[in-house]
Image: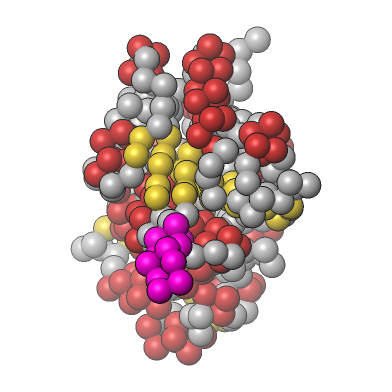
Amino acid sequence: MVTIAVTREAADEPRVAVSPETVKKFSALGAKVRVESGAGLRSRFSDDAYKAAGADVVSHADALGGADILLKVRRPSEDEIKALKPGAIVAAMIDPYGDRAALDSLAATGASIFSMEFIPRTTRAQSMDVLSSQANLAGYKAVVDAASMFGQALPMMSTAAGPIPAARAFIMGVGVAGLQAIATARRLGAIVTATDVRPATKEQVLSLNAKFVAVEDDEFKQAQTAAGYAKPMSPEYQAKQAELVANHIKIQDMVITTALIPGRPAPKLITRAMVESMKAGAIIIDLAAERGGNCELTEPGKTIETPNGVKISSPLNLAGTIAVNSSSLYAKNLLAFIDLMIDKKEKTLAVNWDDDIIKGTLVAKGGAIVHPNLAPKSP
């Protein structure tokens, strides 16, 4: 029987790696799930709910002791990994590009460590895509938070006392988070515009009844990688796009920025001058704060107000603020991933190390970092 351990996350992480629903499904696969007592409380999953689903609710040490697999939201500690079986499997959002020294120490434990951020963007892996599931919720919550901070109505209203104009929302970066932000802002009645350097996003923006804003030159037409991510743009293109955005942003009531490039600092899309040109009461929600932010004035993890009355909010874990939903989706992502590793007939671990998804997410094995994206760079 495969033993799966799930422990509490740190104080700043309210999500949890399994839900009662996925505990039942792991049990059906022949796995035994051991959950640390209280691990799901911040996601409203009680110990009793886990027990009813078939999990053993135990102490921290008992959850880890000799387990085959450790499931986490964030990076586990070395001590947690060392409490598992030698060579055990660890799956979590490892933050593969952050704190390399600590990652090397985790790799040295000999565990097979999988970074869920590296799930391939393929049709087969869609059900495992944690970045998409969490970004979807972050895009939604960003607009809800912006609407709350704005302090005015979003939709156009006709009243006996006169009309109320619709608020204007500008979404910068049209990935999963950006698309959900567009859809949410439209549902709330705002006039929505959006921008992205990837040409394929224009049709997606228009399909949501929003207006697309971008410099559509030859460079723009080649600005997307095979994996669907934005390429770094030339200084010349950035200057032209910045001028277009500067003129557009002056009239916006709320701006949501979502632009991230894996392994790189977040591109600066909003300058100090742009912020100073905005209206008093305008809101910026910067979803790229974890990589330094898309706004020049962003202070990661804080909400500030500029002298001209613009509020800039830079949350570091927005999906975590709706932990019931984000934990449920993340748990399903992990279930689909671990399902690849279990022999359904024998009820044992049977990892196909040549599987594209397994290879694509494996960060460390046998005491060493093995992922090509994390290999030491040549001089």
Q: Which residues are magenta?
A: 154-165
Tell me the residue at 37%/15% (across/down): 217
Tell me the residue at 40%/50% (across/down): 191
Is 55 in front, or is 49? 49
Q: Position of residue 10 (x, y in %)?
A: 67, 64
Q: Is residue 216 above or below residue 105?
A: above
Q: Position of residue 176 (x, y in %)?
A: 39, 46
Is 372 in front, or is 44? 44
Image side of residue 42 versus residue 231, left or right? right
Is 315 in front, or is 325? 315
Tell me the residue at 36%/20% (across/down): 216
Residue 118 found in image quarter: top left
Q: Residue furthest front?
A: 161
Q: Position of residue 164 (x, y in %)?
A: 45, 62
**Is residue 163 a member of the stretch shown in magenta?**
yes
Q: Is residue 112 above or below residue 40?
A: above
Image side of residue 60 versus residue 325, left or right? right
Q: Is residue 294 above or below residue 255?
A: above
Tell me the residue at 54%/64% (across/down): 152
Residue 87 seen in the current view: no
In the picture, the quarter occupied by the C terminus is: top right
Q: Position of residue 27 (x, y in %)?
A: 33, 74
Residue 181 seen in the current view: yes
In the picture, the quarter occupied by the N terminus is: bottom left
Image side of residue 141 versus residue 278, left or right? left
Image side of residue 228 versus residue 38, left or right? left
